[in-house]
Structures are given as structure tokens and as C-alpha cells.
Image (cartoon, helix red, strand yellow):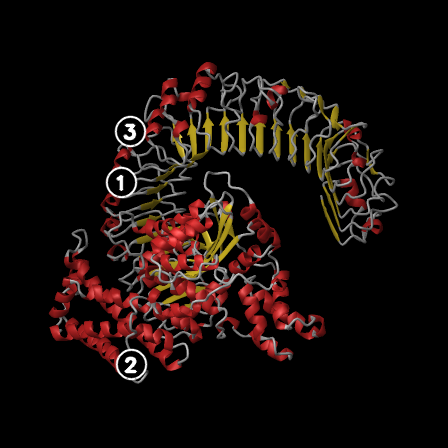
Amino acid sequence: MAGAMVASAALSALFNVLLERLASREVVDFLRGGQLSRTQLQNFETTLNTVCGVLDDAEEKQITSPFVKKWLDDLKDVAYEAEDFLDEIAYKLEFKQVPQSCSDQVRNLLVSSINPCRNGVGNTMRAKFEEILGRLEFLLRQKDALGLGPRAGVQTSSSSSTSSQRRSTSCLVDDSGIYGRIDDKEAIIRSVLSEDANSKHLGVVPIVGMGGIGKTTLAQLVYNDSRVKHQFDKFRVWVCVSEKFDELELTKNILKEIGLCDCDSLPLNQLQLKLEEKVRGEKVLFVLDDVWNDNYADWDRLLIPLNSVARGSKVLVTTRIQSVASVMSTVPSHHLKELNADDCWSLFAKHAFDDCSPSSYPDLVEIGRRISRRCKGLPLAAKTMGGLLRCKREDKEWKKILESNIWDLQSDNIIPALRLSYHYLPPHLKQCFAYCAMFPKDFKFRKEDLVLWWMAEGFIIQGNQHNGMEEIGAEYLEDLASRSFFQKFGGSKSPDCFVMHDLIHDLARSISGEFCFNGKDVNLGGLTGRTRHLYLTRNGGSTLADAKVEVLHSLICREGYALRHPGNNISSLRLRVLDLADSYYGSRPHLLASSKRLRLVRLRHYYYLERLPRNVPTLCKLQTLVVEYCPKFTTLPDSIGNLKQLRHLSLNGTSLGKLPDSIGKLEDLRHLGLAGTRIERLPESICGLYYLQTLILSWCRQLVELPDKMMDLINLCRLDIEETPRLKYMPVHMGKLVKLQTLARFVVGKGRGSKIRELGELRNLQGKLVLLNLHNVDDEQDALGANLNEKKGLVDLEFHWKEFCWGRNVVDNSDLDRSVLQHLQPHVSVRDITIRGYRGASFSHWVGDSSYSNIVRLVLRDCRNCTSLPPLGQLPSLEELWIEWFRSVVSVGLEFFYGSRSNSIQPFRSLKKLSFSYLAQWKEWICADDDNDGNRITFFPLLMTLSIRECPKLRNWKIKHISLPSLRSLSLIHCSELESVGFIEEGGDGSLPSSLQELTIEDIAGLVRLGLRKLPSLSTLWLRDNEDMESFPDNILLPSNLSEIRIFSLWNIKSLDSMGLPHLTCLQTLEIRNCPKLERIPEEGLPSSLSRLEILYCPLLEKRCEREKGEDWPNISHIPIIYIKG
């Protein structure tokens, strides 16, 4: 019931939309043509306005009155009916201008539906109108009996009486009931106690998180910490701001907190003067709790008197809204996360057992733990559920809570906290959020999908904004995420993926009620005729035949199950969204037949779909058409050009080989996706799509060229041509695409197409850019004109020359290559650099310059003429370094660490992963053991992974004085001449770092000199390609902590040493592969700790270990998992 309160808050927005549409001259004329009188239309409008007037009162009263709740549900159903009725009118108005390209039969069919007086259409529409008006009037007559009336002074939902219920907070806290916030508390205290490095005296520290996550509690802990009290010993101020921002009242409250109580009658100017005088030169802590206002001007005026405070003063802000933090903060926001399972249980148990020991009630503990897990780490949920069970000590009562839909219980302590967040959302966000109730819990929302669904439902209001609906929809989602209604999922790898916390999802469900259903969490047998949005999946176990779907607006199906029932031909005329993604089984989606109002159609994984269903080009309101991963789809009809409202067309993963010229008629198209298709060329007509913003051609491996007039796409922001190997040049005048932000590749042509200097005009480029065929740059001034050093947004750059091809004569332009690389110097903001096929004898001075403090990853590959490595040790943030295919490097010395600079700076201070591969001439690696002042240096202090592969001449490698203290994994592969491997520690012989956990040795004869017995942390050992060993471990003493040994291709090994294996009491996995001479398992057997034994391609050993028959089977039969393969 509490959820329905916020649901009704969105009704006023829906009714406002109906009023706006009803006021349209075209709609009025159409209705009058259907024999509706002016009086009827005026009555309809008056009724809508009257209903709007009592919504706020109904919103509050339905909390305690089930009759009012039902009244609101009925009202919402009528509102949907009215919206569908006006949609039908809009659909008919679309055909005043029938496309000339339609067939005569189609044109006659469409025209016959335009006139409301023809074929009885007028009578039908008049009857529907009168039915809707009658239902509204019937509901309106009930308002007096329900005690509903206009609320005095109420204008919008955000100023409704709910504000009178808003919570107030104080600085006091019972820290005995706080769990799992020690790290958060310490992080905030460090920020609060730190001195600001900037010029501002007043620092602002934001705590951001969803409602009920514990932001206020954390602020209270910080406020009352003894260290904070000591530093701010004179003034600590706590003010609860809440959703109503009143500059006058806030200033009064601050003054009262610092002891000036007689200030109620003073104007704002006098109040600010008094406040400034009081705090001037003092170190002050202000806590502003529960802030909602993100208007910079408001906050700037409020904080003016506080500019006189002493340096080190702080404002600690708690908010649900990231934009508030962005406006106010001087340090990064602290995002408060959910409690872990143990802390959530502890909090639940404290309230459920009333401080008694849970062990006194063993039957309740397991049930209670399961209930606490359902709280999903939300402190408010854990406290509320614990309080609900505080006086209950019978397990059946706890089980009843556990097994019921716990979040449907009426709890004013949990739902209001989340409800308040929803209630004060802007109206345009409320319906977007409520729409998501149709999806199951833990659903992964892709930003693009959500925005397209919202567009199709008409939720996105473009107004007078210059941004398109796609950009506005993305802003909606970011706004909801900043208010903690969504959480980003997957980090930087999936920046456009979002999830909902379970409690937030339950809030959405309680808001939407029976109007949104999903077939995974809900039995479709309970579906009603009011459902407008339906999600189905195979896991739900229901089919469309089970459901009443006559009034559906959205139907989204996953995994195909819902569409395989023989009676599934839906005749819904109201569908706006038909998303049949992952429906593998059908060849033709019949649901399109009569869904003439569709705005979004997505068909994904229809294996047998060869072409579009016949009527798709007649869907005049279609905005989004997606046909993806349909391998037999080869043709797009010319009639696609009839879809004048189409904004998003995606054909990724189909076998489409050609686009029709009519694609140029889609004048409103913003997005065109052709990734992974067989397109060779695009029609020139595509260059007339002036509003096109995104063109996806990645993995079009047949693509040979782009249209000549590409420069006409003046609004293009994203051009993705990754993995298009046959594309040999870019069209001329690429520099005219000045709005371009993402350009995956730029291919330098040989004598044709755009020169690389065209990049100079593309000032908005960001993200990743790969520069291909740089050997075709014949003038270094062209490279200079690219102005890469001014492109701050480019953080990932790759420079590709033609890679070396054995046996071919390649023109060596070493000097030109070095000049080109020098002029392509990137901005210092770059984070990831790859250089491949470079033919210069040395690198440009910027490669390895310490000013590139943001580089975290660097790849140098196939730089065959370079005789030395650049000073990469001076890159302070470098974490990954890959050096491959250097033919001319013989020695790696001090230049690698320091270059020409003084060696006083610790080299490679941040490096975590280092790989050398295929350095054919590399013989020695020399490292200095101290600096100019005689101070010992720790090389690679953070290095965790080191790999040296295919360096056949490397002989000398020693690093002195306890280097590589963090090394965890070492791979030495095919370095057959390596004589000394180790690190000379003080007072000892050469050995490997004691921190080592994984070691791979391949084709190295000097294995015995590795000192493996001194590696207390070594857990994994891989040995490969050795012809010298005849026994293992032979005289090698292995550390007893080894848990995994893998032996590959030890061609001459004949036996496993009985003296070396039994003491490996931690060994769990032993794999032996390609050891053709290995004859037997030791008679003493293998370690009893072994749980997995694999023997592959060892013919002699396989026979002796044959299950139940082999001579060695008794020695290994105790091992739980044995896998033998010949």
C-alpha cells in the first residue's frame, strides 16, 4: 500500500500529457469529425482537471484506506485507456500523407482508416470516447464518499504534504549498533582531518549512497569521533537539510548550532554577517545531512559567510544524488556500499534478539541468517526486519516471514526511506523508473536498451532541447543512477551496464503493481487485463497463451520459450515495444501482424529469419528496428525508406551484403549498426543522413571502402571501423566531421584518401584511436598537422607501421619513421600506448618521458631496427609493459631504467607486469645496484608477474640487493643459454625472490641453480621442454608447500624420484604430459594429499596406470580424480 502512494504521484504527469494531447487542434478536429460535440470534449477536459485536483489528497489517504488505493488503481487503468484512445487517433492522423512508394492495395487500406465517419469508424470511436468519459465521471462521483478533495497550497508532488513527514536527524548516534563501517569511517575521517592542498579554506567531503544505506549514521560516527572533536574543538555544526532548500532557514539553524539563538527575526543579510563574524579565522566542521539541492548558485550563496573560516575547515555532506556531490565537493565522493553478509547478520541479530545472544535460540539462527541475506546488505532493511521479529520466538513465525514476499509487508521504516527518494524524483524520471518493475531481480540493464524502451513508450520529453532523445534518455539514466536507483555494474569493463538493488526493485514493483509483470518472478496465471508491460523468459515456465495481453504496451521475451506455444498469435493493437531477443526457434515473428502502433521492434537470434516480415515497412510510428544475430538474414527491402520516423537501425551480426539506396530516405536516422555483416560498400545515399550520429562497421571484414562524400555526415559523433582489414584508406576531407568523438581507426592511404593531417580538425576525439599504415606517411609535416598533443580526450593510442615480413624486401625509412613518431607525440593524458612495426633506429624523446605520468600500459612490438630500449623506468604510473620482437637489441642496461637522466629516481615504481618476448639477439640484462650516492635501490618494487620468452641468447641476468620483493609469477621459456638466473641477496647466493608463488621453466638446463627449496610461498611449478632431465625431482629439493606440479615434454625423463615427492604434503594436482620415456610411479606411491592426477600422452606410464589392471594402479587408486589419455 505504501508503494501505491508513490505510484499515484506519477498519475498527475500522465493526466497532464492527456490534457496536452487533447488540446491539439488536429485531435480536436478529428474527434469533431467523429460526431463528438464540443460539450463532450469540454466535459472530458473538465473531468481530467478535476481528477488531477484530488490526486494529492488521494495519494496520502490511500496509505490507510484500501478503498482509496483501489480507486487510484481504477483511475490509472482509465488513464491508460485514454492514452491508448488518443494513440489510435494519432496513428490515423499519420496517414494524411501516405507514402507514394506503398502499393495501391496498402494505400487504399490505409486511406480507408483515416476518415472517422467511414465504415462505422465514427460510431466505434464515439462509443469508446463515451465509455472512457463515463468511467472517469463514475470515479469522480466517488471522491466525496471517499473524502477526497483539493489540498490547499499543493502544487506538485514535490511540494505535497509528504514534506511534512520528512525525517529530521541529529548528531547523536548509538555506536554499539554499528557494523561494517570501520573502513568507511576511517576513510572519511582522513578526508575531514586532512589539510586541503588547494587554495580554498573550506573543503567539502560528500558521502553518496542510496536511501537507507547508512549515510547519516556514518556522518554521525565521524562527527562524534574523538579525533574530530579534538581538531574542531570550538565549532562542530550539524544541520539536517532535507529536500526543502531554504537559504534563510539553513542560515538560522547554523547560527543556532553555534550558540546564537536570538536570530529568528533577522533578515538574511544580517544573519550572514553574524555568521561570518562568528566563524572568521576558526577551524569549523559543518555537517549538512540529507542534501537534495544541486543548484550551484544556491549553495554558493549559502556558503559565502563560511569563506572566512580557517584553512582545514570542512563541510561533510550526505546525499543520495551524485550531482549534489559534484556541485559541492572539493575531494572525490565517498560512495557508501552495502554491508557484507556477516555484518548484515550482526545488525539484524542485534535488533531481532534484543541484545540477547542468538545462540540461545539455535532454531532461529539459520532462519535469521537467511532473512538477513535477503536484506542484501542494506542496514535499514536489516534493522527493520530485525525489529519486526524482535518479540517473536517461534520458528514458524520466522519461517512465515522468510517464505513470504517480505518486501510486500507494510513497514514505514523501510519503504518510506526509498519511497521518499522516488516521491521527489522529477516527473519525467518517475515513469522511467517504474517501467523497470517488469524485469526480474538482478537484471542487467544496458543503457542503450533502456533508452530505446523509454523512447518507444514516449517517456522521453525532448521539449526545446537541442539534444536528441537518445542523449536525453542517457541523461535520465545517469540522473537515476546518481540518485542510487541504479548502480553501475562491471566497472570500467562494462561502463554502460546497470543493476538495481533488490529493495529498489521491490520499490518499483510496489509502484507499478499489476501494470507491470514478469514471467520469471510472477506466475502469469495472476495476470490481469490491466497489465501494460510484460517480460517473459524460459525460466518463468509460462507462455503467452496463459496471459491476458489485449492491452499490452510492451512485450519483452528472452530465450524463446514464451513464443513456441502453438496458440501464441497475439492480436494486440496497442503494442509499442516488441522485443523478442534470444528467441532462437522461430522463422517469422507473427506478433507483428496487427501491432500497428509499434515504435520498437527487436528480433534477435531468429536463426531462420531471411528477410523482414512483410508489414514492417508499414509501421509508420516505428522508431527503432533491430535485427541482430540472424545468420540467414541477407536482404533489406527498398521499402525500408518508408519508415520516416526511424531513428535507430541495427543489423549487427546478420549476413547482409548490401544496403538499398532507399536507406537515404531515413532522414531522422541517428544510429546505424552494421557490425559483423558482409557489407563491402555503403551506398552514396547514406551521406544524405545529416542527423546520423553513430555508424557501426566494426568486424565488417569485407568492407573495402567508405563513401566518397562521408564528410557530409556533419553530425556524426561515432565511427567504429575496428577489425576492417580490407579498408585501405579513409575518404577525403575527414577533417570536416568536426563533431566526431569516437574514431576507432584511421587508415593512412597510399596516394589516395585523407592525409593524416585531417585528424588535426577533429578536436573532440576521445577514447581509443588506432593509426594504421603509418609507413604511407610521406611527409613528416602531415604528422605534425594531426595535432595529437592537443587531443586530451585520447587515452588509448596505437601507432602501426607495416609489420616485418620474413623474406620480403621492405623499404627502410628509419629517419622518416622517427620524425613521424616524434610529430605524433600525444597529449600527456594518454594512458595506454602501443607501437608496432616501427622502423626507426631509436625512439622519439617523448617515449619514456616522465611527463607522461598517466601511462599505465605500454606495448612495443616489432621494432626491428631499435638497438636499445627507451627509458621506460621513468614512467611513474606504468603498470604493464610488453616488449616483443626486437631483432637488434643485444643488451638492456641503464638506459632502460634512467635514460640520460640521473639515476636518483626509483625506476619502474608502479610496474606490476613485465614481459619480454622474441628478442633474438638479447644477451645480457645489466642493472645497477646502487645510485650515484651509493644508496641501494629496489628495482620493480611492485612487480608481480615477469615473463621472458624466446630469448635464446640471453645468458647473464642478475639483479642485486633484494629486488622484486612483490614478485608472484615468473616464466622463463625457451631461453636455452640462460646460465644464471637469480637475485643476489645480502649475505647469500643467487636465488629467486621468496615471494614467488608460481614458476614456469621451459627449455632451461640450469634448473638446479634456481634454489627452489628457498621459496616458502611457491605453490605452482610448471616444467616444460627439457632434454637433460632423466629423473624428477632428481637432486632438486622442492619446497614442501607446493600444491600443483605440471610436467610437460620432458623427453628423456624415465622416473619420478621417490626421494623428492613424498615430502610434498600439500601437493593436490600433478599433471604429466608428453613424457614418452617415463615408465613408472614410485613404489612408495604419491603424496597422500594428492586429489587430482592427469597423465596424457605418456604411453609407457599409461599402460602401468591403467584402471584396475595396471601394475601401478594400486599406488594411485586412492586419488579421487584420475584422468589418463593416450
Q: Which mark, by number, is residue 342?
A: none
Looking at marks 3 and 2 on the same chain, the residue that comes earlier in the sequence is marked by: 2
Spatial separation of the CA atoms under disc 3 and disc 2: 67 Å
Q: Is residue 359 above or below residue 709?
A: below
Q: Nearer the viewer, residue 1031 or 339?
A: 339
Above or below, 802 relative to 279:
above
Amino acid identity at mark 1: Ile
Q: Which residue is mark 2?
A: 143
Q: Looking at the picture, tell me which residue is in the foreground, 237 or 936.
A: 237
Q: Is residue 317 left or right of residue 85?
A: right
Quadrant occupied by the C terminus: top right
Question: Residue 733 — which label?
Answer: 3
Secondary structure type for disc 3: loop
Q: Which residue is tagged 1? A: 686
User: Residue shown at 25%/64% (left/top)?
Assistant: 17
The alpha-carbon separation of the residues under discs 2 and 1 comes to 57 Å
Quarter of the figure with residue 603: bottom left
Front-lying residue, 437 or 183:
183
In the rendered structure, which amino acid carries the disc numbered 3? His
Measured in 3D between alpha carbons, the distance from the residue under mark 3 to the one under mark 1, in whole angstroms, is 17 Å
